[in-house]
Image (cartoon, rainbow, N blue to C red):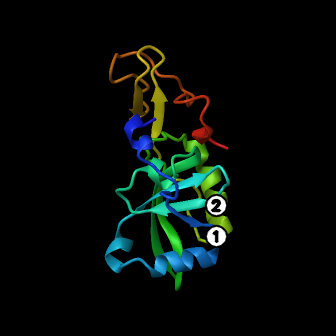
Amino acid sequence: MGPIGLKAVVGPGSGGCRIGSAADFDRWVAERSAAELVEPFTFVVGLDGVLRLAPRRSEHVACAGGRSVLSAGEIGFVRVAGKWAVGEVSNQSTGYCPDVTSWSSVARALDGVGLGRPPGFTYEVVFRRCPGCQEHNIVREADFVCVFCGGDLPAVWNVDPLAECGGS
């Protein structure tokens, strides 16, 4: 959904770090500084169901290697009883605009790595495309009105009916 130019500069091998196992996560987190671990990271869940992580200010499309995703957003980690767990996670990605229903893909990816997690996104962003002007909107306070043209926004996710990141 984001600027076309961003996807054009994504080259082979430019994706985020693939986290397919607990060992992968342990290696990845050991390479992070304490300062890095204070902030959330950019994440995507690829069509293969695997979590990929990149620094927070990375573009989601770069983290995904330019590919379609099941979900995308920001994720932060905390230590709980000596183990790493997810402290916060959102679907905040204006590049992919994933629906809140994409949580199930995130949960499966985190469970596959053995990371403790919340029962859902700790911060949900509701994305909709205006049927009138076709602009993408973030719905705030359940006000389903387009900020660009004032038209009504649909109750159901419609950002890109052909995209995989609508949910699963």
* Vertical arrangement, residue 123 with respect to residue 143, above or below: below
Q: Indicate the secondary structure of the residue bearing disc 2.
A: helix
Considering only vertical position in the picture, is 66 above or below 87? above
Image quarter where the C terminus lies is top right
- On the image, the x and y values in percent for residue 141 come to 39, 35
**x, y percent for residue 38:** 35, 71
- Estimate the spatial distance between the alpha carbons at disc 1 and disc 2, rounded to whole Å: 7 Å
Label placed on residue 17: none
Q: How many marks?
A: 2
Viewer-proximal residue among 93 and 61: 61
Q: Residue at x 49, y 41 (%)?
A: 96
- Circle 1/circle 2 CB separation < 8 Å: yes
**How far across and down, in percent of the image, does residue 19 sit?**
58, 67
Residue 50 in which image quadrant: bottom right
Question: What number is the disc on residue 113?
Answer: 1
Residue at image coords 52%, 23%: 154
Few, some or many residues within 10 Å of mark 1 (<14, 14–19, 20+): some
Q: Amino acid at mark 2?
A: Ala
Q: Is residue 30 left or right of residue 104?
A: left
Mark 2: few, some, or many residues within 10 Å (few <14, many ≥20)? many
For mark 1, give the secondary structure. Answer: helix
Q: Residue furthest front?
A: 12
Q: Which disc number belongs to residue 109?
A: 2
Say which amino acid is labelled 1: Val
**Residue shown at 38%/55% (left/top)?**
58
Q: What x and y, as percent, mark residue 98? A: 53, 41
Residue 112 showing in the rendered view: yes
